[in-house]
Amino acid sequence: MSEQNPNPNEPTTDPAKAKAESSESHLKHAADDLKAAAEAKANEWRGYAEGKANELRGKAEAYKGRAESYYTDARTKAEDFQGETETYIRENPTKAVMVALGVGFVLGLIIRR
C-alpha cells in the first residue's frame, strides 16, 4: 500500500512524488514567468499603439483645420464671384444676355458633334 503523509506541510519521503511536486512547482513558476513576460510585451505594444494613434489623431486634426480653412476661403471666393456676377448682369443686361446666348450656341455645337 502507499504511504500517506498525514501532515501536508511535512516534506514527503517518496522521491518520485517529491520529484513530481518539484516539477509541478517549476512548471507553475515557468508559466507565471511566461504570463508576466506576455503581459509586459502586451503593455509595451499597447503603449506603442496608443502613441501612434495619438500621433495620427494630431495629424488628422491638423489636416481638418487646413481643410476647413480651404473650404472657408473657397466659399468666400464663390460668394464674392456670385455677387460680382449679379452686379455685372444688373449693370449690363443686354451684354450678359448676348454672352449667355453665345456660350450656349458654342456649347450646343460642341455637344452636337
Image (spheres, rainbow, N blue to C red):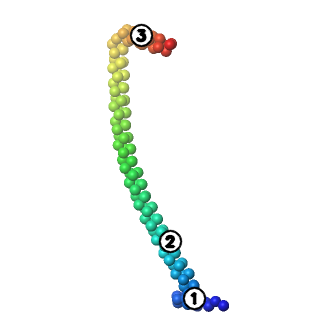
In primary-sequence order, the first of circles 3 and 2 is 2
Which residue lies under the disc numbered 3?
Answer: 102
Asked if the residue at tag 1 contacts the one at tag 3, i.e. Cβ–Cβ closer than 8 Å, the answer is no
Q: Give the image location of residue 75, x and y in percent.
A: 37, 29
Up the image or down, 76 lies above or below 96; here it is below
Q: Secondary structure at mark 3?
A: helix
In primary-sequence order, the first of circles 2 and 1 is 1
Q: Give the image location of residue 104, x and y in percent.
A: 44, 12
Name the residue type under label 1: Asp
Kindly identify the residue that appears in the image at 35 percent across and 34 percent down: 70
Kindly identify the residue that appears in the image at 34 percent across and 17 percent down: 87
Q: Give the image location of residue 103, x and y in percent.
A: 42, 13
Mark 2 packing: few (<14 Cα in 10 Å), some, or many (20+)? few
Which residue lies under the disc numbered 2?
Answer: 31
Up the image or down, 67 lies above or below 14; here it is above
The numbered dot on residue 14 is 1
Q: Separation of disc 3 and disc 2 at Cα?
A: 85 Å
Q: Left or right: where does residue 57 sit relative to residue 13?
A: left
Q: Separation of disc 2 and disc 1 at Cα?
A: 26 Å
